[in-house]
Image (cartoon, rainbow, N blue to C red):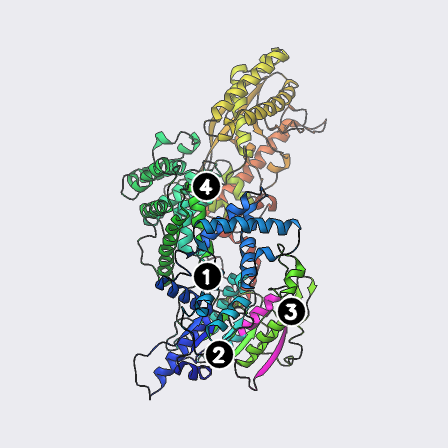
């Protein structure tokens, strides 16, 4: 059994005499009671299985018990009065402050409440605060309004209830204590000190016993290394002796809880620590609590309720889809994944409840605002078929019922009790907290949630009715103010805050962050009270002398209660140099290292390579076994990186769509294609274009663009507003007018094909293509592809053309095309970029003596060779992680989790050092 965290010999006499023992916090009181019980169980002379619990309380709990005693007596001091609750108090402060018309009045609620609490703890009232500066005047006015609200509702603050308890002792309404023992206090507010003295004529302070204990000072390079040193040291010590008490004190534990937990967990997992100590299921306990709102189960409940509030971000709806605490957890992963894709393809940043239900319900009639291109996708249709089956199941029925919640009650004014019932029913309909068996922590979180709803219902004492938004805000605030302390088994390693560890006994203790800026605490003047007034009454954080005294007492307490004390500080914080606290400079600096300096990363990153190395060659492509899509992008991706082509076209890896503001670059390109398709479908030749007057051309442009934008607004909500649609109309009119001027400069032509389909065959690989446009110039053909971005002719040259789109079009053409060109329709950079056998394009740069027909034929042969090679690679299953174009590869970063390019060098080096590489046949050489 682990040694007790309390030296119970200090309290034995007082407990046996049934004295009242007071501590500053409930944690210390609980440890004293626990230590007493352990001593009785271990004492063979006691021979008892039950004993009277010692009268050990935190001072707050004792005072509440005294108040309850007066209430039970119905004493005239407290008759008809009640203590205002935390959330009630916050509401009254909000009302008291709101009348002054300040910007962001809620920012002053906590400050005002804490300031009044401090004054009352120091037996002072707002009227006694001197000065006429604005902050003091505001504060006095707020206090006056707050007091009036309390008076009207027969409520009083906790500190005022203590004042009545003090009167209860003075008037003998409460029995006096023969003796009161106090333990663990570094400072006591005047009100509590006076109250304790009124309860007993004999108040004795119990002090820990000083001894010849060891103390050591340690320097670290920075706070990260310091924490890793402390955690690694604790793990090593527990490895050598798991039956000892070790503590790590972190002064700002509440602000660094996640970081501390991660580092400690990594250290403990890197060392084989015996966790089988009797009565110990956990190796470490962390004293700091978490806001109930931040615990996984309660956070999920609040998220689900919040989804009823107007529109919520896409991220919150995705959390609902994958939450283990909702109905969706019972649905197939395929359904949830397809629902996510459907939501993402709607290009919305947020969704209302109704929009979400519509999006995940597989009814084509309800999908009026979905891009038709989505419904044409065969994979999506397959998913919808599966969803149709699921949609009739009982699992999705609650979602349809929730639409009624939104319409029926979301805008009503109700009592807090009614809203509490509504929230509970709503969560039950969503299947919260799920049907799986909960673990111990989740069970505790659920119990806390039930109590939270009870406290929420108690806000009916305010006597008001509120709407959904206000009710939800109060619920969130209650969850934020409620601290969740998980109840876990005792553990040999305790992680504590600076005040929480005081009074506890350890075999070894390490205190971190003991630099001069952190210990003693710095002075922090309350901005609502005059600084001189605070210093005069020695209020918290007002005097450096007071902070120094508290720090000295704390440090001495830790020295007395630790057989070995280690204090450390970081020498640097960023680029700032730090000094040790002056209170620890007399402690000897450790000459030998307690433990080897830990690495800056988790230990498992440094473990030897433990994977079995296999040559996993992708299988050859066979059209009989699989179908692929991708058009010209297939060979483009193969040219950039073979593995990315394999992942995209054979594994069907696609990037998850992210909502964008306005129209995406792809949308703008598609708009250009559609408008030009319609215009040339009408004109059909350059002669028609040339025959239009400027006014006629402008009219046709404007009408066509307007038609397309109105149609697109059906599945692009951004175009539904007149303002944005008008701006896009103006942009397109200007851009296309410039482009058509470029078209007018060309030799006469006829448009013979628009959006025509074609295909090209490379052995077993068939690639489907769609040509934007084919022009006939005299008896020759020119293939044109529209581009709204910048293009380069070099992109289709070389043995691995980065953009083989036009070469593929040329190879697929029948009869053979005589040229190809990108139509670069980009503001300020309007031009054709291409190559022909007859210099159709003004932008072509060729020698006057060049044989253009011969050059064109050679170009086609080079393309055929290059594309045959790329197609052969793909069909053979070449999926090597080889990058041939770094720029284009960078645009495919969504594939990094699959190709692991950023790890390639490290993996190759590690493999080379540990084991021989495989041969191409897959054998180890």
Read off the residue under disc 1.
161
Q: Looking at the image, can residue 286 be seen?
A: no
Give the residue at x 57% y 28%: 786
Q: Position of residue 129 (x, y in %)?
A: 62, 57
Q: Quadrant of residue 284?
A: bottom left
Q: Nearer the viewer, mark 3 or mark 2?
A: 2
For marks 4 and 2, the one nearer the N-term is: 2
- The reply to whether callout 1 and callout 4 are in contact (CB within 8 Å) is no
Q: How many marks?
A: 4
Read off the residue under disc 2.
202
Read off the residue under disc 3.
221
Q: Check the image and name the residue furthest to the right.
A: 848
For marks 3 and 4, the one nearer the N-term is: 3
Tell me the quarter of the image containing the N terminus.
Answer: bottom left
Read off the residue under disc 4.
312
Task: Provide the residue span drawn in magenta.
Answer: 205-232
Between 911 and 895, the residue placed more toward the observer is 895
């Amino acid at each position: 059994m682990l040694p007790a965290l309390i030296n119970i010999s200090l309290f034995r006499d007082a407990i046996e005499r049934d004295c009242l023992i007071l501590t500053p916090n409930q944690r210390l009181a609980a440890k004293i009671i626990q230590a007493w019980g352990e001593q009785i169980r271990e004492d063979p002379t006691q021979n008892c299985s039950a004993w009277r619990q010692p009268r050990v309380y935190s001072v707050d709990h004792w005072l509440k018990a005294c108040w309850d005693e007066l209430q039970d007596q119905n004493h005239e001091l407290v008759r008809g009065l009640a203590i205002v609750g935390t959330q009630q108090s916050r509401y009254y402060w909000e009302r008291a402050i709101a009348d002054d018309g300040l910007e962001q009045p809620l920012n002053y609620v906590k400050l005002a409440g804490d300031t009044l609490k401090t004054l009352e703890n120091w037996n002072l009232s707002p009227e006694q605060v001197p000065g006429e500066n604005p902050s003091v005047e505001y504060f006095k006015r707020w206090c006056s309004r707050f007091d009036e609200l309390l008076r009207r509702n027969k409520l009083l603050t906790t500190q005022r209830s203590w004042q009545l308890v003090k009167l209860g002792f003075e008037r003998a309404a409460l029995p006096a204590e023969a003796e009161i023992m106090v333990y663990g206090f570094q400072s006591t507010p005047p009100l509590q000190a006076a109250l304790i003295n009124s309860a007993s004529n004999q108040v004795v302070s119990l002090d820990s016993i000083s001894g010849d204990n060891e103390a050591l000072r340690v320097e670290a390079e920075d706070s990260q290394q310091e924490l890793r040193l402390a955690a690694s040291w604790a793990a090593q010590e527990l490895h050598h002796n798991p039956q000892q008490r070790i503590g790590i004190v972190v002064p700002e534990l509440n602000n660094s809880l996640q970081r501390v937990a991660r580092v400690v967990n990594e250290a403990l997992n890197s060392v084989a620590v015996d966790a089988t100590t009797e009565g110990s299921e956990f190796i470490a306990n962390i004293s700091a609590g978490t806001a109930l709102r931040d615990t996984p189960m309660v956070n999920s409940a609040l998220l689900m309720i919040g989804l009823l509030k107007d529109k919520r971000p896409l991220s919150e709806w995705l959390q609902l889809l994958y939450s283990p605490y909702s109905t969706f957890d019972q649905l197939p992963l395929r359904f949830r994944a397809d629902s996510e894709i459907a939501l993402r393809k709607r290009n919305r940043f947020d969704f209302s409840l109704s929009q979400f239900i519509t999006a995940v319900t597989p009814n084509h009639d309800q999908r009026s605002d979905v891009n038709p291109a989505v419904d044409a996708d065969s994979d999506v249709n397959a998913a919808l078929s599966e969803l149709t089956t699921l949609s009739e199941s009982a699992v999705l029925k609650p979602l349809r019922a929730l639409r009624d919640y939104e319409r029926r009650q979301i805008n009503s004014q109700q009592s807090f009790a009614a809203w509490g019932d509504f929230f509970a029913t709503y969560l039950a309909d969503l299947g919260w907290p799920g049907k799986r068996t909960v673990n111990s922590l989740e069970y505790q979180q659920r119990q806390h949630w039930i109590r939270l709803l009870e406290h929420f219902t108690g806000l009916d004492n305010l006597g008001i009715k509120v709407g959904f938004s206000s009710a939800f805000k109060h619920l969130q605030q209650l969850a934020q103010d409620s601290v969740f302390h998980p109840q876990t088994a005792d553990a040999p390693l305790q992680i504590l805050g600076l005040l929480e560890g005081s009074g506890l006994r350890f075999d070894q203790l390490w205190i971190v962050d003991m630099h001069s800026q952190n210990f003693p605490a710095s002075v922090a003047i309350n901005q609502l009270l005059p600084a001189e007034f605070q210093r005069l009454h020695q209020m918290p954080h007002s005097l450096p002398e007071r902070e120094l005294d508290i720090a000295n007492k704390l440090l001495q307490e830790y020295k007395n209660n630790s057989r070995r004390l280690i204090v450390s500080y970081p020498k640097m914080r960023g680029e700032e140099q730090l000094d040790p606290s002056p209170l620890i400079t007399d402690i000897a600096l450790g000459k030998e290292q307690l433990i080897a300096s830990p690495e800056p990363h988790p230990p498992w990153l440094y473990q030897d390579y433990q994977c079995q190395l296999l040559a996993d060659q992708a299988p050859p492509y066979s059209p009989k076994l699989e179908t692929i899509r991708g058009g010209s992008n297939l060979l483009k991706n193969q040219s950039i990186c073979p593995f990315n082509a394999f992942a995209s076209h054979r594994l069907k890896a696609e990037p998850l769509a992210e909502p964008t503001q306005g129209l995406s670059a792809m949308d703008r390109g598609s708009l250009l294609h559609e408008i030009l398709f319609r215009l040339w479908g009408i004109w059909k030749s350059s002669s028609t274009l040339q025959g239009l007057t400027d006014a006629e051309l402008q009219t046709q442009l404007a009408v066509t663009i307007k038609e397309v934008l109105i149609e697109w607004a059906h599945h692009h909500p951004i175009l539904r507003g007149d303002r944005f649609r008008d701006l896009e109309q103006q942009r397109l009119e200007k851009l296309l007018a410039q482009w058509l001027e470029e078209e007018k400069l060309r030799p006469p032509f006829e448009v013979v094909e628009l959006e025509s389909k074609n295909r090209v065959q490379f052995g077993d690989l068939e690639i489907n293509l769609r040509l934007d446009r084919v022009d006939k110039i005299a008896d020759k053909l020119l293939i044109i592809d529209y581009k709204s971005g910048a293009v380069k002719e070099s992109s289709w040259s070389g043995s691995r053309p980065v953009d083989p789109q036009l070469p593929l079009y040329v190879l697929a053409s029948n009869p053979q095309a005589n040229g190809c060109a990108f139509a670069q329709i980009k503001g300020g950079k309007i031009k054709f970029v291409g190559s022909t056998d007859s210099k159709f394009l003004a932008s072509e740069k060729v020698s006057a003596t060049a044989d253009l027909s011969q050059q064109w034929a050679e170009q086609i042969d080079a393309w055929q060779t290059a594309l045959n090679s790329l197609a052969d690679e793909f069909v053979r299953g070449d999926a090597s992680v080889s990058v041939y174009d770094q720029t284009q590869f960078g645009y495919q970063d969504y594939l990094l989790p699959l190709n692991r390019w950023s790890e390639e060098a490290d993996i190759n080096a590690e493999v080379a050092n540990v084991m021989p590489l495989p041969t191409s046949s897959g054998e180890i050489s």
